[in-house]
């Protein structure tokens, strides 16, 4: 199964965003993780469409857009128009319409002319069972390893078991759904989280602090 590192630009220096995205690319990452926060679903507000649109002009990297917003179904087309390649939303943000939102994401085309990849996410307090009904119809499941809302937090150890449970479910059902993890991943714990079953790994601080390309290379190597 492909293993992918998805550096989160939330931890970037926004005065040098284009240059730092270039460094991520040079280090060999295939994804760029784009955290959108609305101040309602999570307490913080990050950035939105104009920023994503600008970054799209300077890279071909896969834009892995993580929506931490209420009623995410409202904004699928808009994020596709800004350059999203995949959109992940939280089941907690609209639990009654999750199936519909997945369909909407998958039937929307990216600027590259491909159907968007759909992801569904669970916060640390939401059991994996909440998203299992969608496991076969989504491209990726994001298991949050910190409480969403801020970069630079510590990974919550209990979330590793959720990844393990989910990997067992996906494999035993013959599915090829990606498992993404997000929050507090660094050189010290990336191997363990990959062994637990994650194959798409988000890293913010661990990539953007220090030598970005070198950090990407190191983390990629540790993913195996
Ligand atoms: C948290 C965000 C994460 C965050 C990860 O709400 O979804 O993507 O940027 O940052 P680190 O790797 O610093 O925990
Ligand atoms: Zn994220």
Image: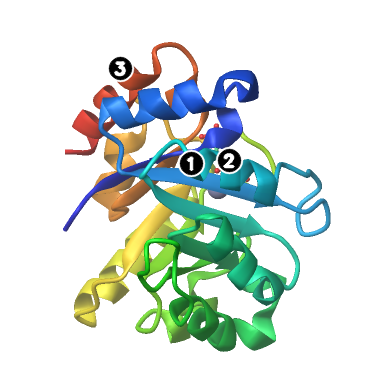
Q: Please state if 50 lies on the left or on the right of 139 as rendered.
A: right
Which secondary structure, mark 2? helix
N-term mark: 1 or 3: 1
Identify the residue under disc 1: 57
Identify the residue under disc 3: 214
Spot the residue most to the top: 210
Mark 3 CB lies closer than 8 A to ligand 1: no
From this viewpoint, is residue 148 visible?
A: no
Q: Please state if 14 lies on the left or on the right of 135 as rendered.
A: right
Identify the residue under disc 2: 54
Task: Check the image and report above or below for 152 versus 92.
Answer: above
Q: Which residue is at a point 30% across and 17% down the rendered structure image? A: 214
Task: Check the image and report above or below for 97 versus 153.
Answer: below
Q: Where is residue 186 in the image (x, y as percent from the top left)?
A: 41, 29
Q: Which of 86 and 60 is in front in this view?
A: 60
In the rendered structure, are the residues bearing label 1 and label 2 in contact, judged by CB atoms less than 8 Å apart? yes
Q: Where is residue 45 in the image (x, y as percent from the top left)?
A: 78, 44
Q: Which residue is at a point 29% across and 26% down the rendered structure image? A: 26
Depth check, mark 2 against mark 3: the one in front is: 2
From this viewpoint, is residue 131 visible?
A: yes
Mark 1 CB lies closer than 8 A to ligand 2: no
Mark 3, Cα crowd under 10 Å, few <14 / some 14-19 / many 20+, is: some
Q: Quadrant of the C terminus?
A: top left
Q: Position of residue 178 (x, y in %)?
A: 32, 63
């Amino acid at each position: 199964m492909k293993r992918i590192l998805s550096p989160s630009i939330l931890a970037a220096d926004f005065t040098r965003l284009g240059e730092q995205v270039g460094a991520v690319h040079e280090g060999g990452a295939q994804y760029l993780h784009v955290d959108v926060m609305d101040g309602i679903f999570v307490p913080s507000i990050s950035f939105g469409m104009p920023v994503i649109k600008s970054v799209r002009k300077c890279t071909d990297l896969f834009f892995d857009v993580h929506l931490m917003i209420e009623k995410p179904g409202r904004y699928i087309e808009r994020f596709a128009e800004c350059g999203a390649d995949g959109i992940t939303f939280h089941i907690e943000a609209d639990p009654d319409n999750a199936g519909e939102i997945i369909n909407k994401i998958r039937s929307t085309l990216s600027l590259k002319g491909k159907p968007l990849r759909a992801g569904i996410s669970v916060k640390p307090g939401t059991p994996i069972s909440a998203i299992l009904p969608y496991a076969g119809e989504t491209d990726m499941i994001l298991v949050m390893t910190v409480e969403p809302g801020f970069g630079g937090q510590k990974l919550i150890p209990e979330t590793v078991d959720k990844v393990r449970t989910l990997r067992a479910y996906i494999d035993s059902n013959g599915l090829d759904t990606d498992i993404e993890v997000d929050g507090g991943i660094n050189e010290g714990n990336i191997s363990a989280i990959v062994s637990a079953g994650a194959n798409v790994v988000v890293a913010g601080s661990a990539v953007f602090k220090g030598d970005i390309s070198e950090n990407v290379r190191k983390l990629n190597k540790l993913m195996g």
